[in-house]
Image (cartoon, rainbow, N blue to C red):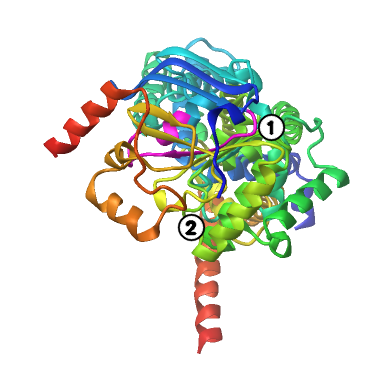
Amino acid sequence: MREHLPDEKSGEPVIQLKNVQFSFDKVLVLKDVNLVINRGDFVAIIGPNGGGKTTLIKIMLGLLKPDAGTVLLLGKPPVKSCRQAGYMPQYATGEKDFPIKVIDVVLLGLLGTTGWRPFFSASERQKAEKCLDMVGMLPLSMKKVGELSGGQLQRTLLARALVSEPEILFLDEPMANIDVGGQTMLFDLLAKLNEEMTIVFVTHDVGLLSRHVKSVVCVNQKVFFHPAAEITPDMAYMLMGEKCSMDLIAHGVPHRVLGHHNHHDHNDNDSLKQQDKGR
Amino acid sequence: MFELLQLPFMQNALFAGVLAAVACGVIGSLVVVNRSVFMAGGIAHAAYGGVGIAFFFALPALPCIVAFSLFIALVMAALTVKKRGRMDTIIGVLWAVGMAIGIILVDLTPGYNVDLMSFLFGSILAVPKSDVHLMSILVVFILAVVTYFYKELLSTSYDREFSQVRGIKVVPLHFLVSALIALAVVMTIRVVGLILIMALFTIAPYLVEKYVSSLAKMMLFSSLLNILFVLTGLWLSYKFDLTSGATIILTAACFFILFKCGVILFTKLRSS
């Protein structure tokens, strides 16, 4: 069992959010977000549905512009540096019948690094095949994406995010369509990738905080950074009350389930508790 | 049959038909995978405003329609780039306004215009040589642009947000696609008329989409199918003295229905 103390993370900051605020159609989604993620971290972003998890990583990637505050990705505004990031979205927006093969989806991850020619080169195809092999999708590389299962599509999209050899990997609900055995394998793969890149992933399932995760970010309009892979009572409150606490006990987070909270954001936590009592 | 092909108007008709078929096959594929058929319909109908302007100011028709369709397409792109959810409403408004402008301007033009119907329903047999030349230039232009931006167009059609993270300028590309639709619309007006353009945009790409494994192949086979529709329709309309545009569309529709029935029959036979 590994303990991750804050001073262990000496890496430079790769994501910096300062006083970030974001609203969607006048509804406040994120408020006063201050967050620093350092190089080499393996961060799980957790929080209730609609709490702003996906919004948060879209802001980090520059896909959404905050109403206020500053965002730096690798020390630059995200629009300038987003190409050094790999992104695996929650769902492919492409339709089921879209005429595209698995390998061609992965090759699209090389856009921005490739030349003007309408087709990809042999060495680029090799790169794509290597990534497909990593996620175990190489045998299906010539299939149309419409013929894939949900889990196979997720793995294809992971390969697409990896093919550009990113410095930071953003994953939105990477485990959503994958069975338990597949999830363990995927976490092992991510842990290996984490030796070379920072990983930030969104999940609504706290049972998925594997032993590889180094820090946890809790999102429910406000954002808390916890420099250890543990679930505190305050975090449990954020995750919508009883059902989730039950889950926590049932699945057993690898260490210090419901450990004591000693974070400094007391005001925020108190307001959350009140919110919880009111429910 | 062969003496028919020696008639100059028939040769022009064949060239114009094949050019329009290719343009609609390529751009129609983009329209279908982007689910922007309604937008293409809006541009096609609003293009009638260009016809009105050409009549009213006594300007050459095709350049006028090109300019007006491009204008409408770019306005649509500008209005829809942010609020993709409200796209259909905005398109509906422009659709109606464009047509209304065309009709009012034609009303205000002195004299009765017989040629008007040709823009609504097509007049492939009356395509002048100069239009064939302009159409060839437009087709070469469309093919060149689509080839150059193929990877970017493919990526944004498949997953817009991911493309943005890869540094693709999705907003200019959105304008580009709208402009390409407008150009393809203009090309097709002479052949089947703006009322019937949607069939050439949608029928072939929809039929092909399920059976091909890449967007490029979808464009290729849609173009080939469109050529088949245009040539068969043209021959039938000559043989039975029918309106050519409508005959081309009905040829495509018959093919579509027969193909779908064939597929259903085939799967039934295989499962039993």
Mark 1 residue element: loop
Tell me which residue sits at (44%, 12%) in the image.
A69
Image height of B60 relative to B124, above or below: above
* Residue bearing the label numbered 2: A177
Q: Nearer the viewer, residue A99 or A195?
A: A195
User: Residue A50 at what x, y percent from top left?
Assistant: 32, 37
Mark 2 residue element: loop
Is disc 1 on the same chain as disc 2? yes
User: Residue A2 at what x, y percent from top left?
Assistant: 57, 45
Q: Is residue B188 visible?
A: no
- Which stretch did the figure color magenta? A39-56
Kindly report the distance in space between the C-alpha atoms of the residues bearing marks 2 and 1: 25 Å
Q: Amino acid at mark 2?
A: Asn
* Residue bearing the label numbered 1: A167
User: Residue A260 at what x, y percent from top left?
Assistant: 34, 38
Image height of A237 relative to A131, above or below: above
User: Residue A273 at what x, y percent from top left?
Assistant: 21, 33
Dot 1 falls on which chain?
A: A
User: Looking at this rendering, what residue extends furthest in the top direction?
Assistant: B57
Tell me which residue sits at (27%, 40%) in the image.
A237
Q: Amino acid at mark 1?
A: Glu
For the N terminus of chain B, give its image quadrant. Answer: bottom right
Q: Nearer the viewer, residue A40 or A19?
A: A40
The numbered mark at residue B213 is none
Tell me which residue sits at (59%, 51%) in the image.
B205
